[in-house]
Amino acid sequence: MTVRIDTTRLASTAPLPTAIDIDGDTYRTNREAQESYLDELRTQLDLARAGGGDRYMERHRDRGRLPVRERIALLIDRDSPFLELSSLAAWGSKFTVGASVVTGVAQVSGVEVIVIAHDPTVRGGAMNPFSLKKTLRALEIARLNRLPVVNLVESGGADLPSQSDLFVDAGRIFHGLSSLSAAGVPTIALVFGNSTAGGAYVPGMCDYAVLVDGQAKVFLGGPPLVKMATGEDADDEELGGAAMHARISGLADHFATDEVDAIRLGRRIVSELNWRKLGPGPSLPADPPIHDPDELLGIAPADFRVPFDPREVIARVVDGSRFGEYKPDYGTSIATGWASIHGFPVGVLANANGVLFSEESEKATEFIQLANQVDTPLVFLQNTTGYMVGTEYEQRGIIKDGAKMINAVTNSAVPHLTVNMAASFGAGNYGMSGRAYGPRFMFTWVGAKLAVMGAAQLAGVLSIVGRAAAEAAGREFDAEADERQRQQIEGQIAAESHSFFVSGKLYDDGVIDPRDTRSVLGVALSAIHSNSVEGRRGYGVFRM
Amino acid sequence: MITSLLIANRGEIASRVIRTARRMDIRTIALYSDADAEAPHVREADEAVRLPGVTPADTYLRADLVLEAARASGADAIHPGYGFLSENADFARACAEAGIVFVGPGPQAIDSMGSKTHAKDLMRAAGVPVLEGAVLNEGASREDLLAAADGLQFPVLVKAAYGGGGRGMRIVTAADELPEAVASAQREAQSAFGDPTVFLEHYVESPRHIEVQVFADTHGHVVHLFERECSIQRRYQKIIEEAPSVAVDEELRQRLGDAAVEAARAIGYVGAGTVEFVMGPNGDFWFLEVNTRLQVEHPVTEMITGTDLVEAQLLVAEGQPLPEPLLNARIDGHAIEVRLYAEDATDGFRPTPGVVNALVLPSGPGVRVDAGIDADSVVSQHYDPMLAKIITHAPTRELARRAMARALLETRVDGLTTNRDLLLGIMREPEFAAGMIDTGYLTRHDPAELSSSLTPQLLGEHLVALTVIEAGERRADRRHLPGVPVGWHNVAPPPSFAEYRCGDQEHRIEYRFDPHDQMRAEAWVDGTSHRVVFHRELGDLTIDGIRRGYTVTRHGPEAVVASARGSVAVTDVERFPEPGSSEAAGSLVAAMPGTVVKVDVEPGDRVSRGDLVVTLEAMKMEHAIRAPHDGRVASVGAQPGDVVDAGVVLAVIDEDEALSDE
C-alpha cells in the first residue's frame, strides 16, 4: 500500500531549538562518560561476535563453513539495516555472551523478517537457557509484528547439563513456529549443519526447508543413538543428509549445493512470498534531524540523578527535529507530543525531571488515550526515578493518578517502543511501558540503570529498616556492621542495575549506542507496520 | 547531374557519405542487412532498402541485390564507400550496364589495380619504384612455393593478392614456416575476397606506411593532396593516421606526389584514389598498391586541405572538373585520426562485439567524429569492429596530438571493450609524440602496457567510487527505510563487500560507512585501505584526499566508472551463482561469437598442448583455439560452418591422468 507523504507538518510544526553548548564543560564531561561506556559495550559485543573464540572460528572456516554473521550478511539485502536483538544475552552468566544464537530484524528480498541464526562455534550451537529465552523473544517479536522468520540452523541440540532449565520451555519453539504458520506468517529453515533430535523439528515445523549438501544432518537420532536403540548401523547421510531429505523423505524442499546456494534459495523463497505489510507505512516527511545525532553522547549525564531536557534527545532523533508538543505548560516533568521517525508518525512521552507527579500522570494518561484514538504508535523515553512520595503527594492521590497512567499503558493497543535513556526505577518503569507492559521493542542506552530503586537509596532504606527493627527489638544497633552491609548491598544493586546485567537477563532487546536511537526506532517502527497498527477504542478520551 | 544516391555500405562511411550528399540536395538511399536494421545510417538516409540476411556475403557483397535496390529506389548513382563492392570491377561494370553512375574509377582501373602483381608491372613501366615479389595461385604445390620463395629475401610478407586491408597477411621469417602461413592466408583470402591467391614480397624493416591521396577528373586533371602517414598498425591494419607525415620534407613530398600522380596517369585514373608506399628509414620508398576508392583515413586529408572529398567524388562522377580547392590545395596545420575499435588491445586485439550501453563522443573546435554507432547499437560479429573515427586538427602536430588525447579521454563507449585506452596511451607515449614511428611500433610497445591508463592506486580509487556510489543508490532505492544509513547495524557487522571482474583480474572491495556520519566511509581494495568523504552530489567524492567527479553507468552486471583520470569497466562477480553454471575442466570455449571454420580433432584423438583444435572466424579474423594441455579429446561441440555464441563449449580436452593426479 502506498501512502502519500503528508507535508503539512513541515509548515505546522517548528523544529525544536537546542540549548546544548558542545564546547561547554557539561557536554564534554557527559560525552567522556558515554564514550567510556561505549568502549565497554564494544568489548562485550566483540566477545559476542567472537562466538566460540578464534580456535573454533578457524576450525569452522577450515571446514569451508561461513561464520554465522557472514551467513546473515549474505542473506540480507545488500547494505540494508540489521537490528540485532539481545546481543548481550547470557552476560554475567557462565555461558558465552550472545548465548550461541544471533537474532534480529533484517530485510531479505525487500521483506522485513526475523532472523534466528545459530552460532555453531559456541559449543556446536548448543542451546542453553539464555539461547532459549533469546529465541523465544525473537519468535514473540515475529508473532506480535507479523514478521516472517528465517532460521539459519546449525545446532547440536540442547546443552544437556542445563536440560532441567530448558526441556519444558523449549517446546515453545516448535509451538511458536507452528502458531506463526497458522497465523499466516511464513517460516523458513536454511539448514547448514546439525539439526538433531529436538533441532530436527525446526525444519520440520517450518513452512519451507532448504538443506545444504554434505553439511545438513537432520534426524531424530544420530548413528550412535540408532545403534543403541535398534542395533542398526546407520550412515548419517542416509539417515539425515540433504540428498536423502530432498529425494526420499521430502523434508527438504530444496537441495542446496553449498552454503551460498542455500542463502540464494532462502532469498528466492522470501522473494516469492508475495508479502504485503498490513500497517499504513510511513506517511510523513523522513528528513533527518536538523541537530546532529552525534551530540546525543553529550546529553545524558553520568549521574542519573542529574536531570536533562529530553527535548534535546527528541531533537536528535525525530524527522526534521519536529516535535508538536502536547500540554507543554502542564505537568512539565513529562514531555508529550507528536513527531515522526523515518516517516512513521509517533507519539512521544519523555520524562523531563525524573519524578512523576499527579499532573504528569494525568497528562500521560490523556496522551496515551489520544494516541489510541488515532492509531499512532508510542515511544517512551525513560528517565524516571518513579512516582513522587511524601505526605502531600499521597494525600493528593498519587496512587490513584499513577494507577490511571499504568492502566492506560496496560490497555493501550497501539504498539509501544521503549528506550531507557538514563534511569528506570520503581513504578515509573511500569508507567513508562517497561518490559512487563509488552512494548514491541525495548532498548537501553549504554549508561542507563534499571532497578526497583537506586542502589544508594535501596541500601539506605535497608539500613533504616534495620535500625528500626533493632530499636523495636531493643537490640543495640551495630553501626559498623550496618555500614559494611550497606556498602555491600549498594555494590550489588549497582551491578544489577547496570545495562549489561539487565540486557543479559533479556529484560530488554538490547543495549544501544545513543547515536543509533533514530535508526533503531526506525527499524522497529517499520517492522511494527508489518502488522496492522490500531489503537484501543470503547470510551472516549477521559479529560483528567 | 546526380539527384539520388544509393550508398552501398554501412556504418560510419555510409553516414559520412549521406552527410555530404544531403548538403548537395541529393536524395540518399541506404542499404541495411538484418543486423543493421536499427543502425544510425539507416535513419540518417532519406530512404532505405533491406538486404535480407546478416553476413556480408548475403547482403552488402551481393552486387545483384544492390543493383536491384538502386533500380527499385530510382537511384542515379551508387557510392560504394570502402570495402564491400568498392573495388569490384564487375560491379562497376554492372552499374554502367544498368545505366547507374558508379562513384569511383572505371572498371579497367579497378581491374588493373585489383591484382597487386599487375599493378606492380604497370608501376614499374611508369618508372615508380616497386618491391619485387611472387604470386601463389590456388593449388600451388610445395615446389611452386619454394621456387617462389627462392628469389625473395626473408623476412617475407604473405598477403592476399585481391582485396585490401590486413586480411590474410602474415610475416614469415624462415622458409619452413611458409607452408602453414600460406595455407592460412589463402583460407582467409578465400573467405574475405572469394579468391585464395596470395602474394609474397620482401618485407622492409622499420617501414613507414606513407600514402598519397590522388584525385583525377574526366577533364584531364590529376592532382595529389599530399601524403598521409599510417604507420601505427596492429595486425597490419591501420589504427592511427595523420597528415602530413613528420618523415616527409618538401622535397620528398614533391617526389612522392609526382610518383603518385604518375601512377594515377599510368592507369587512366578518375576519381579519388590512394597510392600506397612503404618507406624505409632513409626516405627510400617503394610502391605498394593503389586503392581505387575513398580511404577510411580520408578525413585527415580533408582537414588539412579544407576539402570535402566525397563532394569532389560526386562532382567528378557527374562529369564536372575538379573543384578549385582541390586544384590548388595547400597544407594547413596537422590532423590526426584514430580508429576506435570494439576490440581488446590487451588480448591480441580480440574483437569484442556486443551492445553499446552508453556512448559519449568528444566534440569541440578542431574535433571531428565520424561515427557509425549510437547508444544501444549492436556491434555485430559479422562486420568490421570499427565504431568511430575521431579526428583532431590543429596548427601543429603537437597540438593535434594533445587535442586527441583529451578527446579520447572524453570518449566513452560503455558495454564494449574498446581500444580507447590504447589510443590514448599511444597519444601520450614519448616516441609517438616525437614522431618516431613505423609499422613495428606496436610490436616494440606492448599494447597492454600502453592501454593501462590507470595506476593501481587510481584503479583502486575508481573501484571504491563505483562501490560506494552504488551502495548509496541502493540505500535510496530501498523499499523500506531508505533513510537508514548504508549497512547500518547496531552491532559492528563484517564489512560489506562487492566483487568485480576487471579484465582477467578479480577485485574484492570491502567497505563500511560510518554509521554515525554517512558522509564518510572506509573501503579496502584487495586489502588496501582507502578513505572516502562524500559531498552533496553522490558522484562527487574525495578519496584519499583527492576530490573528483565520478560517474557510474550500469547495465545488468556490467558497470563503468569514469572520472577525468580515466574509466574502468567491470563485470560483477555473481554473489549467488546458479549451481552447475561452470563448465567442465578442459573446456575450450568460444571467446566471442563467430563461425567455426575448421575442426582439427575428433573425440578420442590424442592432442598435445598447443595443438590446433578449432579455428573460429569472427569479425573477419581467424582465431586459432589450441589445446590447453596434453590429453585426449573428450567431446567436440562444433562443426565447420556452425555459428556459435560467445561462451559455447567448442571441445573438451581431458587432461592426461599423469598430470591430473598431481
Image (spheres, rainbow, N blue to C red):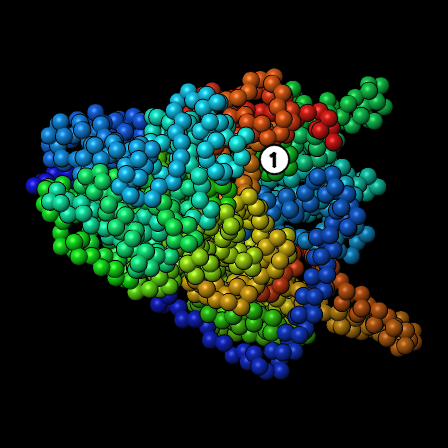
Q: Which residue carries the number 1 mark?
A: A262
Please state which of residues A241 and B58 is positioned toward the viewer in this rendering: B58
Relative to residue B641, is residue B282 depicted above or below? below
Left/right of residue A151 with respect to residue B518 in the rendered view: right
The quadrant where residue A142 appears:
top right
Relative to residue B34, is residue B302 depicted above or below? below
Left/right of residue B409 with respect to residue A38 in the rendered view: left
Q: Is residue B240 visible?
A: no
Q: Determine the residue positioned at 66% across, 70% down.
A: A35
Q: Which residue is outermost to the bottom?
A: A24
Q: Is residue B282 visible?
A: yes
Q: Determine the residue positioned at 57% across, 81% down.
A: A23
Q: Position of residue A241 (x, y in %)?
A: 70, 27
The quadrant where residue B37 appears:
top left
Q: Quadrant of the C terminus of chain B?
A: top right
The quadrant where residue A487 appears:
bottom right
Q: Position of residue B491 (x, y in %)?
A: 64, 56
Please state which of residues A222 and B551 is positioned toward the viewer in this rendering: B551
Q: Chain of mark 1?
A: A
